[in-house]
Structure formats: C-alpha cells, structure tokens
Image (cartoon, rainbow, N blue to C red):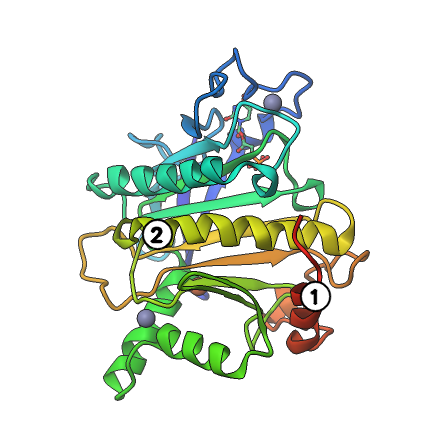
Amino acid sequence: MSELRWNPLLREWIITAVHRQDRPVLQDCPFCAGTEGVPEGVGAVAVPNRYPALTHPPPRPYIGGSSSQQVEPSDGSCEVLVYTSSHDTALAYLPLESVQDIIRLWRERFLDLERRPHVKYVLIFENRGKDVGVTLSHPHGQLYAFPFTPPLMRMELESLLVHSHSGGTCLLCEMVELELAEGGRVIATEGSLLAYVPFWARWPYEVQIVPERHLSALDEMKEDESLALASLLRRVLQKYDNLVDDEMPYVMVLHQRPVDGGKYSYYHFHIEIYPMRRSRTELKYLAGCELGAGVFLNDSHPEERADELRRVAPD
Ligand code: UDP
Ligand code: ZN
Ligand code: ZN
Ligand code: FE
C-alpha cells in the first residue's frame, strides 16, 4: 500500500512507499547477464523496478483523504534502466556506441510513456555511488513515470514562461549564450552542446549539459546532437572521477518537457548533475540551511570549481 499525500504548506506531493524498505542489498546482482538484466552483447534495456514507488494501476491508498488532507493513488511506474551486461563498469567508461544506446533508450521510454494518459511527467535519472544510497552497483539509471509534474520542473517551466512573456526569448538559450561569451564556467563543449558549472550552482561541482539549439526533449534531438551528447556526457563523468581519483558520487537528472498533453515547446532540455562532494575528498551534507530553509550554501566559487573541472583531463 502506498499513496500520494499533499503538503499544502509547500504545495508538494510526497510518496509513501513503505514496501521499498524491503528492497534488498543483494549478494547476487539481478542485472548481470543471464538473469533479468541485459543479455550479453545487447545494448541498454529498461526492466520494471521490482520495488516500485508508483504502479499502474495504483494500489489502494493506506489512508483515506479529505479536502484538507488530500490523498491520491500512487499511479505511475518505475523502471530500472540497465546500461550494459557488464557489472564492473560505469556510464563514463562504456564505449561511445553504448552511451548512444542509453540515450536511444531514454528517448524510447520517454515517447512510449508520453502516449499513456496516466503519465504526466517522465523523470529519468541516475544515482551513482554508495554515498548517494545506491543499493546496486551494476551500471544503471532509473525512470519514474509520475502522475504530476514535479516541483523543480514546475518552477523552471514557470520561470521560462514568465521570462518569455516579459520580452525575453528563452532563459536557457540566453544562459548558454552568456556562458559561451564569458567562458569562465564552461568546462567542455562538443558539437553544439555545452557543459558548464552554473553561475548559481547549488553544489560545488554541479554541471549542466545544455544543447545550444532550443529543444524541449530528446525526441527533438538530431542524430549528430545525440552523438555529441553521448561524447560530452562521457567526458564530463570521466573528469569527475579523475578529479577525485575515485568514483565521484553524483545524481544525474534529465530535465525534459512534461507529457501531460500541454504545449511545452518553450521548455529547454538539459541535464543536471550534482556530485555529492564539497571538495575532492569531503562529502557535502544537506543540513539546516538547505533542508530547513531551501537555501544552499556553496562553499566555493563556481568559477574556481569550473576551472578545476576544465583542467582535469578525461580518460
Ligand atoms: N531493484 C529491482 N530488482 C531487484 C533489486 C532491486 O528492480 O531485484 C531496484 C530497486 O528497487 C532500486 C533499484 O533497483 O530502486 C536500484 O536503484 P539504486 O541503487 O539506483 O538506488 P535506490 O533506488 O535503491 O535508492
Ligand atoms: Zn551486475
Ligand atoms: Zn531555449
Ligand atoms: Fe533544470
């Protein structure tokens, strides 16, 4: 039993997912070749998450709601995106063609779920490293098909809309232009894609990967752009590991348009990566300011971190 509960103070949904407590920390990897994972030599595949926080049809809520304690069924789905049949590797070290396969899978799953009326937002992400709470080290990402658009995306959508209505073009198009012109926070480019530490980075080594061309989701990407994306992604992730001489723990998230039937051509696709370190060796914890007030303390200058990341070579 699980459900969505509405917090009217923060205007956000939380998902109760009690059964996820039972997900195992496994001895035998379920995603290695021969089990439910990828057969040897096949590209990336999506498999259902065995401990999903969202399911379709949804389970009956644990508790009944009311107008002041709003409850909705946890409708949706959760998938594991298994990147490869090999266990001891990572996205950064897969051959370029395999990373292209992963991007192809991202696009396919997005388009498939876009057709389903109960899905309003497709969240694709990767948690990497023990410090992020990863329970399985086999290279994989995840997908959550939500019955609502999550708050961060809602906020971005609203900002982009307000900006265009007040005489600007696209906030992200303008940001890319500015970063290219200034150059100080750019860490790498590939074709018409750009990777930079945002001016307003929450995390010391935060990176955004953004296509220069305005597009709202991966399905609008041309072949040469997705090839450039694969290559840039690998380079950025390799830089991270080389910087810390270890497996850099990170969360990587795709920000694409919602799939609720609205028109979102004003959205600008990008990838956000948040490494969980505040220096090469120390973890960054979210504490009083961040969790209690929503204010991030970044104990470094984004320009200096960008400089470090620009200098460190990929493999
Ligand atoms: N999982 C699964 N089948 C299994 C074991 C685990 O689908 O046999 C799922 C599990 O529910 C989890 C995911 O695989 O969501 C592994 O995700 P990750 O390590 O990125 O982080 P988690 O979601 O556990 O925090
Ligand atoms: Zn494995
Ligand atoms: Zn744009
Ligand atoms: Fe974003």
Ligand number 1: quarter of image:
top right
Residue furthest to the bottom: 167
- Graded by Cα atoms within 10 Å as few (under 14), some (14 to 19) or many (20 or more), the crowding at tag 1 reads few
Q: Is residue 168 visible?
A: yes
Residue situated in front as seen by the camera: 5 or 158? 158
Residue at disc 2, secondary structure = helix
Residue 179 at x, y percent in the picture:
49, 77
Please determine whether, in this image, residue 2 is positioned above or below residue 164: above
Residue 33: quadrant of the picture: top right
Q: Amino acid at mark 1?
A: Arg
Apparent side of residue 261 relative to residue 122 in the rendered image (left or right): left
Please determine whether, in this image, residue 138 is positioned above or below residue 162: above
Q: Is residue 204 visible?
A: no
Residue situated in front as seen by the camera: 76 or 138? 138
- Graded by Cα atoms within 10 Å as few (under 14), some (14 to 19) or many (20 or more), the crowding at tag 2 reads few
Residue 217 at x, y percent in the picture:
31, 54
Residue situated in front as seen by the camera: 134 or 199? 199
Residue 277: quadrant of the picture: bottom right
The residue depicted at 59 percent of the width and 55 percent of the height is 236
Apparent side of residue 80 relative to residue 88 in the rendered image (left or right): left
Residue furthest to the top: 34
Q: Amino acid at mark 2?
A: Asp
Please determine whether, in this image, residue 29 is positioned above or below residue 153: above
Residue at disc 1, secondary structure = helix
Residue 69 circle label: none
The residue depicted at 38 percent of the width and 79 percent of the height is 174
The residue depicted at 43 percent of the width and 35 percent of the height is 2
CA gap, disc 2 and disc 1 = 26 Å
The residue that label 2 is drawn on is 224
Residue 311 circle label: 1
